[in-house]
Image (cartoon, grey):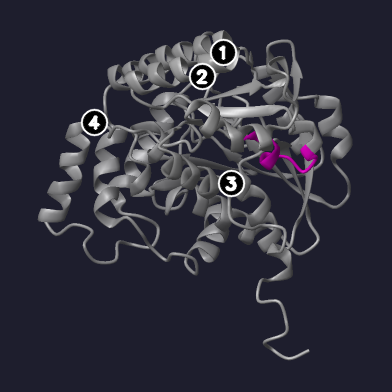
Amino acid sequence: MTSTERPFLNRSLAEFGTTIFAEMSALALRTGSINLGQGFPDTDGPEEIREAAVRALRDGRGNQYPPGPGVPELRTAIAAHQQRRYGLSFDPDSEVLVTAGATEAIAAALLALLEPGDEVIALEPYYDSYAACIAMAGGRRVPVTLRPDGSAFRLDLDELRAAVTDRTRLLLINTPHNPTGTVLTRAELTAIAELAVERDLLVVTDEVYEHLVFDDAEHLPLAGFPGMRDRTVTIGSAGKSFSFTGWKVGWITAAPALVSAVRSAKQYLTYVASGPFQYAVAEALALPESYFAGFRADMHAKRDLLAAGLAEAGFGVFHTSGTYFITTDVRPLGESDGFAFCRALPERAGVVAIPNAVFYDHRDQGAPFVRFAFCKQTGVLEDAASRLKTLAA
């Protein structure tokens, strides 16, 4: 086989084509539909934080390469945030690493911590980059499926325990969970921590929606549980907490040996990124609790608005305890194929959503489920709910 006859795409990535987000966003543009598919806000975050970024640009801070681990101001702010909110103490110099968004943090962590053939247990359905990053690291993903239990999705702890083998290296945990909206409970996290300690597993925990929990749900960092401090890489993000997704500022907190390992991989990915925005995010993390409470209350109201509209349109609606996504069941509408439903929905109702099946290895298990994002302006959500009513007719 000549070089031109050989497939250009690395075999480990052969199963990954253009993401569903690109497909559905293009469909939204082509049809003029309301895009409730991709999870990005349609308004910017706090004005004073935008101005902090402008000020950094004008003052010449971050216009050249920032330090590899992240600017000291941001690393200090991340450590202070973890201490203030969760009582977790991290050294800004050796236990904090700034990344180009949470996606790079996930990629760098998996590339650093996995050897070819290592098994990674991930909670299914999962954010689509998990599967691609595990593949690029040469790992083997082992899904443990969150399944509907009444009005919400729940983790089967017995299934999780049974999935661990002698080849398991790492647990990839996401809470609050995208796309199901589940927030793992103290009891569930305790069991996960006990399993990790018992089987000597590393844990990468994606906590980017930490500030978006609703009702009686509580976000509890896994690193705070007994035995987890030195085996957990915790991932955070400014995009989801402050509605500046385009800035691509993420981070990890972990023990020095883990941070050093992840930094070794990260330096050959972006090296550094988001210089001026790092200074602005440092100020954002120091905002008073009133900001976070207001942000949470606003999203809570939007969740309720869209959930009510979806129910009125005839969907089965699962309860969202965190994130800014609602998972629905299309079977009450007489449908069973989420892909076909989402591809037809723009023409039928002028709204775009995402089929949850793309987040599953076992796609048949996700077939009837469809995800909607409610991180949009109230008027947009009201318009979308009104359009979706045509489905009920």
Residue 72's x, y, as percent? 30, 51
Q: Is residue 267 left or right of residue 243?
A: right
| Segment colored magenta | 355-363
Question: What residue is shown with label 2?
Answer: 388
Q: Is residue 158 left or right of residue 23?
A: right
In whole angstroms, how far apart are the C-alphas of marks 3 and 1?
24 Å
Label 2, residues with CA under 10 Å away: few <14, some 14-19, many ≥20 = many
For label 4, the SS is loop
Q: Is residue 364 left or right of residue 246?
A: right
Q: Nearer the viewer, mark 2 or mark 3?
A: 2
For label 1, the SS is helix
Q: Tell me the amino acid under the disc marked 1.
A: Ala
Q: Are marks 2 and 3 in contact (CB under 8 Å)?
A: no
Which circle's residue, 4 or 2, is located before the other in the chain?
A: 4
Residue found at x 33% / y 43%? 76
Question: What residue is shown with label 1?
Answer: 313
For label 2, the SS is helix
Residue 294's x, y, as percent? 32, 16
Res 225 seen here: no
Q: Tell me the amino acid under the disc marked 3.
A: Ile
Residue 128's x, y, as percent? 62, 46
